[in-house]
Image (tube, rainbow, N blue to C red):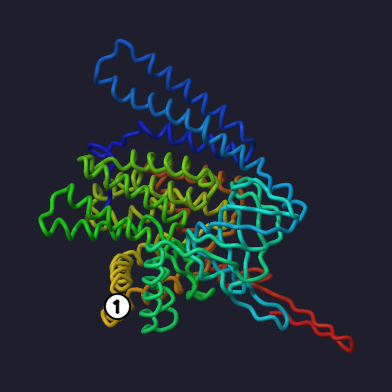
Amino acid sequence: MIVRSGPAGWADWRLVPAAFVVWLATLLGLLVVWWLAIVVGAGAGVAGLAVLVGMRGEGRSAWWPRAGVGVSLVLCGVAVAVPTAVRLHGAVTDALRPLAGQGAFGAFRVAVTERPKPVVSAGFGGRPGGVQAVVLPARVRHAVVAGRPVATSGAVLLVAPVDGWSRLLPGQEVDLEAELAPARSGGMTVAVLRVRGPPGAADGAVCWQRVAQVLRSGLRAASAVLDPEPAGLVPALVVGDTDGVSRHVQEQFRVAGMAHLLAVSGANLAIVCVAVLLLLRALRVGPRGSAAGAMLALAGFVVLAGPEPSVLRAGVMGAVGLLALAIGRQRAALPALSTAVVLLVLHDPGMAVNLGFALSVVATGGLVLLAPRWADALAARGVPRGLAQALAMPAAAHVVTAPVVAGMAGQVSMIAVLANLVAAPVVAPATVFGVLAAVLGPVAPWASRLLVRLAGPEVHWLIIVARQASRVPGAVLDWPAGWWGGLLLLVIAVVLLAVLRHRRGRVLVGIGLTVLLIVVVPVRVIAPGWPPAGWAMVACDVGQADATHWH
């Protein structure tokens, strides 16, 4: 189902300038210098006041839209010029930064802010591969470095052994001893803490985090009734738990352009909320009651999946959208997206440089702005409405996210639209069955296992699609990485969309694609080039002789 963003499909753009200001000011403050947030915020505030002053004498019909733009610019300009700039300055001048550059050693008490994420190593020599360490984002509560107390409350990243640390939950405070290391520039993290031993004294997690952990563990246990690959994919699809997904399967999903299914995103929340909304409406509950019920389901799912950045941004976007439904503005998709951007970046300035956040925002924007128009254009040419929407949604999401993915990974998936189109029908039922299995696990394990079995064929289909799509010759096209690579693909995409608006342009693009399929693809299959992708050479010298092996 495609959600339109305004009457007759027109978008409500009033909050977009304010969201852009907040994002741009924070981005420049992190990547360039912190005081640029003040400059951009002050400029936005002045522009907003100019809009409000220029409205004198205008009629009410013209007054309201411009008032929304002016007021939002003033409020958001003040927000980034004062509190956000202060936080950016505090992160830049945090006392741990110079100590991290010296590699100092200290004792800390930190509060865990996210679930531990495994670090997979390939192994070397006699050292086995696999998960040997985890990373945990945290915030410092107390620090003593080189025998002296350090005044800091900055965000840090823990790199710690699996034993003991993988069981910590968000909200727990723990004592540790660690070596400081510099953090990556351009973010809110002030230092990296390299931990060698087990965690010290730790507080207990809050009750809802313990319940969520029990539900996640129950889902993993119930998934064991499936074969290993589908069993690992069910928790990943439902709550983003990829611990049981093999690296081989993850690589197949990445090449096929389906890696977003392995992380919790707005799609998961949309599926859960829509299922609850449909159930409540079937029970003849009114719009406000249905929205309230869906809001409770959304909050429960956010707790179940954990306070990850992707979960929080999807939760805020969903909450704003449900609020719009409750107050009778079912078409306010673009204002909801803009509000979510403002709230999330003001809450966590690090979101401004988070590529996952950028992917989420532009994908949602593509679904709101491009997908409805493309679906209408296809329907006007005789394509059935349902098929038109099914084609437009993955195409729009892929087109708008491709520049971000290309800049991030240095690759462009040529098969992603088709693979996601084929996979889309089974994602919703698999997610619903998985969520119900997680909820029923502690009270009815047999029912949980039954629901996982019902999700089994859908999950197996996703694996088949990813595997076959990743084997297509030329499924991934190498592309320049970084900002310039992303901007280059963005320019190409804009030019291509402009060309496709004209009949002659569509003919030329069709001829180009035909040549590509007839000439380029067969050549890449017959003569893929040298050396082939994934090559490796191993040299062994034991003192008496040596050997070289290539594969």
Callout count: 1
* 400 and 126: which is toward the camera: 126
* Residue occupying image coordinates x 30% and y 70%: 439
Identify the residue at the far right of this view. 544
Which element type, helix, strand or loop, lies under badge 1?
Answer: helix
* Residue occupying image coordinates x 23% and y 40%: 329
Identify the residue at the far top of this view. 57
* 149 and 191: which is toward the camera: 149
Left or right of 232, for residue 375: left
Q: Quadrant of the C terminus?
A: bottom right
* 486 and 526: which is toward the camera: 486
Q: Is residue 530 above or below residue 320?
A: below
* Residue occupying image coordinates x 65% and y 68%: 529
* Residue 11 seen by the camera: yes
| Residue type at the position of mark 1 | Ser
Task: Examine the image and state in which quarter residue 432 appears.
Answer: bottom left
Q: Residues within 10 Å of mark 1 (few under 14, many from 20)?
A: many
Left or right of 484, for residue 68: left
Left or right of 226, for residue 123: right
Identify the residue at the far left of this view. 284
Q: Is residue 164 above or below residue 279?
A: below
Residue 221 drawn at (x, y percent): 39, 80
Residue 76 drawn at (x, y percent): 44, 31
* Residue 516 seen by the camera: no
Disc 1 target residue: 448
Q: Is residue 167 above or below residue 366?
A: below
Residue 443 drawn at (x, y percent): 28, 76
